[in-house]
Image: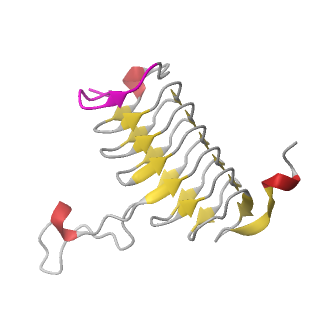
Amino acid sequence: MPISENVTLKGAVKIPHPDLVNLYGCTVGDGTMIGTFVEIQKNAEIGARCKISSHSFICEGVEIEDEVFVGHGVMFTNDRFPRATNPDGSPQTDEDWTLETTLVKRRASIGSNVTIVCGVTIGEGAMIAAGAVVTKNVPDYAIVAGVPATIRGNMRDVDQ
């Protein structure tokens, strides 16, 4: 089932193609729009009035506050040292890795094909350019771009 029974949809969440998403154990705020081929994992939190564009992956440990734009194909991570198995060759379980959380603050915008390495905070009103790889915290209203993402400007200089 693409939208699990344990998903909390608050208010009027818009999912135009509910058979083409994978949501389980997450919370999604009122007025948020979720595009096709989006996966949102357990314990992820999406605020109100967000737009989550197609082909994006929001994993456990990600909190997205209100009015955030997530472009197409955005990938979040939650494990800095991922492995399929333990040193003895046994498959890893939830007890074998450390979840690192990520916070995206209110009104931030994340461009298409951005990768966000776990353990960072993206500041309020920040703008992440398409294709960037975010490896460290992004200050409020900063414009970042590149691999790794670096500060290129300030949204206060461009917002009117």
Quadrant where the image shows the C terminus: top right
Residue found at the very far bottom of the displayed protein: 87
Q: Is residue 86 left or right of residue 12?
A: left
Is any atom of residue 159 visible in this view? yes
Q: Is residue 34 left or right of residue 41?
A: right
Residue 80 drawn above or below residue 69: below
Q: x, y percentage for residue 66?
A: 55, 39
Q: Position of residue 14 (x, y in %)?
A: 50, 21
Whether the magenta-drawn stretch holds residue 5 is answered as: yes
Image quadrant for the N terminus? top left
| Residue drawn where x is 25% and y is 67% of the image | 84
Residue depicted at x 64% and y 71%: 148
Magenta part of the protein: which range? 1-11
Q: Position of residue 74 (x, y in %)?
A: 55, 49
Q: State the scheme by which the image is colored.
A: secondary structure
Whether residue 34 is in magenta: the answer is no
Asked whether, in this view, residue 1 is left or right of residue 33, the answer is: left
Kindly tell me whether residue 93 is visible in this rendering: no
Q: In front here: 158 or 74?
A: 158
> Taken as a whole, is the magenta stretch helix, strand or loop?
loop
Residue 114 vs 25, above or below: the answer is below
Report how many numbered discs are placed on residues in the image.
Answer: 0
Q: Residue at x 60, y 51 (%)?
A: 113
67 vs 58, nearest the viewer: 67
The residue drawn where x is 75% and y is 59% is: 143
Vertical side of 91 occupied by 53: above or below: above
Query: Residue 36: percent from the left, percent from the top?
Result: 49, 29
